[in-house]
């Protein structure tokens, strides 16, 4: 049977995820949905995912495509995590990969991996999956450069005991760099969501291909130089659907909003600093300013902090984008993290103007070319926020440009085409005849 999109033969693909997919609320789940949507019409795609716990349903931000192939599940236990972390520590491997270990996953993959032309693996944390595959038989969607995330987090440590935390995080960043290098050299294809992450990963490579090193799967594709890796390292943006309806001014409930996973350290760090450095000055100038913070896993300490700051907490809303539409300006003050800040893309799509830190903006693209305001110092934040609140024409120009940006850079059909193209290139690199579907 041929590929309904390109006419090419259908391949047998196995998508291995680190998280159950019953509820799409996190970046890796969104990414899995993207790959399923792109690849299922063209290839036979089976899933291997953790067994779900209590599954709820949501339409935010996307609905999972129907799984046309088999859906295998595996168990990950507390014992798996403990043994995995201990093994990683002894071997000098990233502790992150130990946390995602699973004896059941290894057994199941060992039984079925040979039945597939290519195994698509999510995240460098699943290194043990790669170790069980032959060199060149995997396509690894790193999503983001986790080594960059940890290195930035190490640099952001403050307060009592920060020296020890900084050293531990920096050591984990170095271990992740070695693992990411091994993945780059052994996989048939690798993907990330952000150009910044792609450049970071290429920067880990030596200038000359003199030493390709040892691959994570016990071998090398034979071509660990920068040019070879660059050809296999793909920037695959996330798809974002634009909101067609015009936002009515009488629906506005808040002046400023920050959205995201509030249990994620990067968001908590950003919010804590922004509340300390910027919010007091804004409130002195505009006493009636209304701030909302919306997302999952806020925690009691954050809830108390927001209450004392006079802000509104919207905990685990059914639709984050629906909440976002009720604000005049979105803020993205992150100083750490990797990948692309989805909160910025969602604000673009919903017609909400954005003020972002230089680090957050760089995750979306070159800051000077983006349709958003960039602020670093408290004075810059106050200036840019007030400009968007007071100058309606300026804000509307930014909104129009942002929607054009989303349509150009994150169009769902174009994003799906790029996923198919990258996977097709990886299939061709395996040098195998396709298995019968």
Image: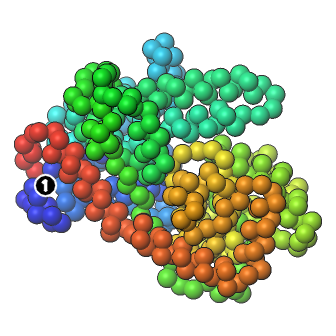
Quarter-of-image position of residue 293: bottom right
Front residue of 268/116: it is 268
Q: Residue at x 35, y 63 (%)?
A: 415
Tell me: 387 left or right of 216.
Answer: right
Q: Residue at x 85, y 65 (%)?
A: 282
x and y percentages locating residue 139 in the rendered image? 28, 42
x and y percentages locating residue 425 in the rendered image? 21, 49
Residue with the mark numbered 1 = 10
Residue 12 visible to an observer of this rendering: no
Question: Element at badge 1?
Answer: loop
Please rate how many residues cluster around mark 1, counting C-alpha atoms within 10 Å: few if below 14, some from 14 to 19, many from 20. many
Q: Residue at x 42, y 45 (%)?
A: 198
Total marks drawn? 1
Front residue of 98/204: it is 204
x and y percentages locating residue 302 in the rendered image? 77, 49
Q: Residue at x 66, y 42 (%)?
A: 265
Q: Residue furthest top?
A: 90
- Residue 235 in the image: above or below residue 223: below
Tell me: 241 left or right of 148.
Answer: left
Residue 236 visible to an observer of this rendering: yes
- Residue 47 in the image: above or below residue 77: below
x and y percentages locating residue 133 in the rendered image? 25, 29
């Amino acid at each position: 049977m041929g590929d309904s999109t390109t006419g090419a033969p259908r391949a047998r693909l196995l998508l291995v995820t680190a998280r159950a997919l019953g509820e799409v609320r996190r970046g890796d789940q969104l990414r899995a949905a993207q790959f399923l949507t792109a690849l299922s019409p063209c290839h036979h795609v089976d899933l291997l995912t953790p067994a779900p716990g209590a599954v709820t349903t949501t339409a935010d931000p996307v609905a999972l495509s129907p799984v046309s192939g088999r859906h295998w599940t595996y168990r990950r236990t507390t014992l798996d995590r403990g043994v995995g972390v201990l093994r990683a520590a002894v071997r000098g491997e990233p502790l992150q990969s130990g946390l995602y270990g699973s004896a059941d996953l290894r057994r199941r993959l060992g039984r079925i991996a040979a039945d597939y032309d290519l195994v698509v693996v999510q995240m460098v944390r699943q290194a043990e999956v790669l170790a069980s595959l032959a060199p060149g038989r995997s396509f690894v969607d790193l999503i983001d450069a986790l080594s960059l995330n940890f290195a930035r987090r190490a640099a952001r440590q403050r307060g009592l005991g920060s020296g020890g935390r900084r050293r531990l995080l920096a050591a984990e960043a170095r271990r992740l760099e070695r693992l990411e290098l091994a993945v780059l050299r052994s996989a048939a294809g690798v993907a990330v969501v952000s150009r910044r992450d792609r450049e970071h990963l290429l920067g880990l490579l030596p200038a000359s291909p003199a030493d390709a090193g040892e691959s994570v799967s016990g071998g090398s594709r034979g071509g660990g130089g920068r040019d070879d890796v660059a050809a296999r390292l793909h920037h695959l943006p996330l798809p974002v659907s634009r909101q067609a309806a015009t936002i009515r001014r009488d629906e506005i409930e808040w002046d400023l909003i920050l959205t995201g996973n509030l249990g994620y350290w990067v968001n908590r760090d950003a919010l804590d600093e922004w509340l300390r450095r910027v919010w007091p000055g804004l409130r002195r100038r505009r006493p009636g300013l209304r701030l909302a913070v919306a997302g999952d896993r806020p925690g009691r300490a954050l809830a108390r902090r927001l209450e004392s700051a006079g802000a509104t907490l919207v905990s685990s809303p059914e639709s984050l984008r629906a909440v976002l539409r009720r604000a005049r300006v979105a803020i993205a003050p992150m100083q750490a993290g990797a990948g692309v800040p989805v909160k910025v893309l969602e604000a673009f799509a919903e017609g909400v103007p954005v003020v972002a830190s230089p680090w957050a903006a760089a995750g979306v693209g070159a800051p000077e070319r983006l349709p958003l305001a960039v602020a670093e110092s408290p004075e810059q934040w106050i200036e840019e926020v007030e400009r968007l609140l007071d100058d309606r024409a300026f804000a509307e120009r930014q909104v129009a440009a942002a929607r054009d940006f989303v349509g150009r850079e994150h169009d769902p059909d174009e994003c799906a085409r790029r996923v198919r193209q990258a996977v097709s290139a990886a299939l061709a690199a395996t040098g195998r005849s396709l298995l019968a579907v």
